[in-house]
Image (cartoon, rainbow, N blue to C red):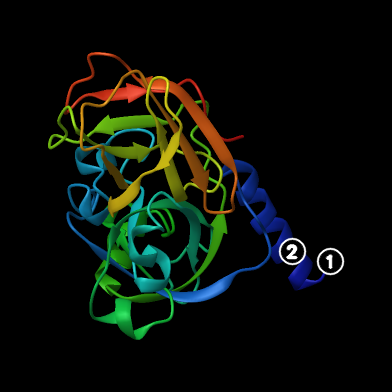
């Protein structure tokens, strides 16, 4: 007869086939709460700056605010985690995937080494069928979590020009990075120029103050959290406009 530990592994592996990408080892302990509407996306974008995009694909309200170790001063924005709960009778024990879109600055988010303040939708997704509200009523629970690659199913990286940008100053919200999901550095290259570093403004927004008129088209080179580099060539076109989103034709594999 198969051992109980083997059967548990098979059950987890089966759930991973449905919830790709998945890693069945290396789970760590943490805590979870939820915020916002019971079936909603937490807040309107939060500290990463994604705004209403948190409710739309590919995020689809499956998001989390992170405590300090998860949010990491904004550098954790865009990272993906699998989270599962097992300590409540309503827990399914199956992992679900969320992306970091916000910061959880107080309460248990500071007292626990790793804390996820999940959207109402994501928190309920950890429950057994028909018991999402029962689990949400628990409020605060213990969870296990695992960092996983982000998989946006063929969607390429988007650059949303901040409304405060002008001919001499460019700020962009960068989203939908596959793989690591988070960024450690961003650079900019004007038409006919060399690469120069952009500064992290806040959350997933990066900025560059040229001091003179920017020469478009503009290319952007991003470096993921693990050091992988990718160039979005001429992604900010001539005649670019503040408030518009420009979708590249590249993403990490």
Closer to the camera in the image, 128 or 245: 245
In the rendered image, which quarter contains the N terminus? Answer: bottom right
**How would you rate the neighbour count of disc 1 (Cα within 10 Å): few for under 14, some for 14-19, many for 20 or more?**
few
SS assignment at label 1: loop
What whole-number distance in Å separates the C-alpha atoms at marks 1 and 2?
A: 7 Å
**How would you rate the neighbour count of disc 2 (Cα within 10 Å): few for under 14, some for 14-19, many for 20 or more?**
few
Residue displayed at 17% across by 27% down:
167
Closer to the camera in the image, 160 or 176: 160
For label 1, the residue is 2
Q: Earlier in the sequence, mark 1 or mark 2?
A: 1
Give percent across and percent down for residue 198: 36, 44
Q: Is residue 166 visible?
A: yes
Residue displayed at 62% across by 49% down:
16
* The image quarter in which residue 243 lies: top left
Give percent across and percent down for residue 251: 52, 31
Residue displayed at 54% across by 58% down:
94
Which numbered disc covers residue 7?
2
Q: Does 64 sit left or right of 25 as displayed?
A: left
SS assignment at label 2: helix
Labels 1 and 2 touching (C-beta < 8 A)? yes
Q: How many circles with numbers are drawn on the protein? A: 2
In the rendered image, which quarter contains the C terminus? Answer: top right
Above or below 207: residue 6: below
Q: Is residue 131 visible?
A: no
Above or below 109: residue 119: above
């Amino acid at each position: 007869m198969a051992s109980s530990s083997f059967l548990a592994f098979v059950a987890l592996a089966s759930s991973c086939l449905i919830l790709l990408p998945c890693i069945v080892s290396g789970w760590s302990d943490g805590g979870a709460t939820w915020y916002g509407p019971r079936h909603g996306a937490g807040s309107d974008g939060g500290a990463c700056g994604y705004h209403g995009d948190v409710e739309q694909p590919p995020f689809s309200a499956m998001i989390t605010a992170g405590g300090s170790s998860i949010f990491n001063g904004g550098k954790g924005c865009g990272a993906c985690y699998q989270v599962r709960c097992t300590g409540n009778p309503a827990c399914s024990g199956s992992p679900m995937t969320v992306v970091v879109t916000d910061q959880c600055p107080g309460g248990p988010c500071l007292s626990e080494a790793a804390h996820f303040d999940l959207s109402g939708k994501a928190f309920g997704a950890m429950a057994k069928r028909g018991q999402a509200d029962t689990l949400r009523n628990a409020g605060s629970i213990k969870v296990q979590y695992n960092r996983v690659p982000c998989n946006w199913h063929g969607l390429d990286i988007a650059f949303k020009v901040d409304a405060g940008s002008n001919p001499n100053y460019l700020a962009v919200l960068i989203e939908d990075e596959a793989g690591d999901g988070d960024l450690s550095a961003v650079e900019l290259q004007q038409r006919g120029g060399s690469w120069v570093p952009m500064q992290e403004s806040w959350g997933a927004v990066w900025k560059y103050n040229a001091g003179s008129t920017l020469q478009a088209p503009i290319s952007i080179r991003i470096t993921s959290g693990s050091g992988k580099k990718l160039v979005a060539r001429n992604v900010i076109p001539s005649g670019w406009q503040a408030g518009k989103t420009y979708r590249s034709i590249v993403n990490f594999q």
